[in-house]
Image (cartoon, rainbow, N blue to C red):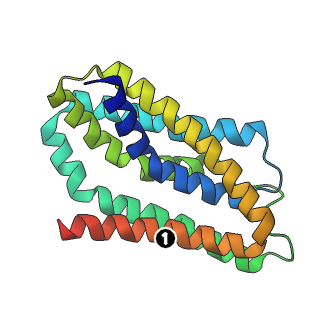
């Protein structure tokens, strides 16, 4: 597998993390290095870890994960998106959190929800004879970079649109969960 192919795969599996990073950025008043590191490490770390797990667990486990991954992503993104919607309606005039939620529980849920498909990619990479360590590193680095970009874009959008951005972010997370569920149910 070529480097260009690995980069395309990395960008593809990073898109959910990118979209969720935009949503996280919508609620941040001031983007801090700790936000970037937290988001990048959670999302990039899980996106790098899951292909490794998929690669080494093999095809039989991937069948099980594929049968439930859409439900897991749907539930996690729906709960977190619903929470975001609820918070956006309860805020005063400020569109952002003075203390944005980058807690262990929230970030773990988002990281798992956005990286389940990377597990199946790991199985695919095993059959393609790819260097899994190189692939995982590229996926992790690309996801980290796109998470930073997503946080920044979300912050810019949030500063322009105020509390409406929180509503949009929550709706986007819920929509990603619904899209994931529908795509898998239609297969």
Task: Tell me: residue 33, above or below residue 152.
Answer: above
Task: Tell me: residue 25, above or below residue 161.
Answer: above
Task: Tell me the element at label 1.
Answer: helix
Task: Tell me: residue 133, above or below residue 161.
Answer: above
Between 160 and 99, the residue placed more toward the observer is 160
- The residue to which callout 1 is attached is 174
Q: Position of residue 108 (x, y in %)?
A: 52, 47
Q: Residue at x 87, y 76 (%)?
A: 93
Between 164 and 46, the residue placed more toward the observer is 164
Relative to 104, 133 lies left or right: left
Relative to 116, 154 lies left or right: right
Q: Position of residue 170 (x, y in %)?
A: 59, 70
Label 1: few (<14), some (14–19) or many (≥20) C-alpha neighbours in 10 Å: many
Q: Quadrant of residue 22?
A: bottom right
Q: Residue at x 59, y 43 (%)?
A: 147
Relative to 106, 181 lies left or right: left
Quadrant in the picture for the C terminus: bottom left
Q: Position of residue 18 (x, y in %)?
A: 53, 50
Q: Position of residue 159 (x, y in %)?
A: 80, 63
Residue 186 visible in this rendered orientation of the protein: yes
Relative to 18, 134 lies left or right: left
Q: Quadrant of residue 50?
A: top left
Residue 27 visible in this rendered orientation of the protein: no
Quadrant in the picture for the N terminus: top left
Q: Quadrant of residue 6?
A: top left
Q: Residue at x 56, y 42 (%)?
A: 146
Q: Count all numbered tags in the image, as a single digit.
A: 1
């Amino acid at each position: 597998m070529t480097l260009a192919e690995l980069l395309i795969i990395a960008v593809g599996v990073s898109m959910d993390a990118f979209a969720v990073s935009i949503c996280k950025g919508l609620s941040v008043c001031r983007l801090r290095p700790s936000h970037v590191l937290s988001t990048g490490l959670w999302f990039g770390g899980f996106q790098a870890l899951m292909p490794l797990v998929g690669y080494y667990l093999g095809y039989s486990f991937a069948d099980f994960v594929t049968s439930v991954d859409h439900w897991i992503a749907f539930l996690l993104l729906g709960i977190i998106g619903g929470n975001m919607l609820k918070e956006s309606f309860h805020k005063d005039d400020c569109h952002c959190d003075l203390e944005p939620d980058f807690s262990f529980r929230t970030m773990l849920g988002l990281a798992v929800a956005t990286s389940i498909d990377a597990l199946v990619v790991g199985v695919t990479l095993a059959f393609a004879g790819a260097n899994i360590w190189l692939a995982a590193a590229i996926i992790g680095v690309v996801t980290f970079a796109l998470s930073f970009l997503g946080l920044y874009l979300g912050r810019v959008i949030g500063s322009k649109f105020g509390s409406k951005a929180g509503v949009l972010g929550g709706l986007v997370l819920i929509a990603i969960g619904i899209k994931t569920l529908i795509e898998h149910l239609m297969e």
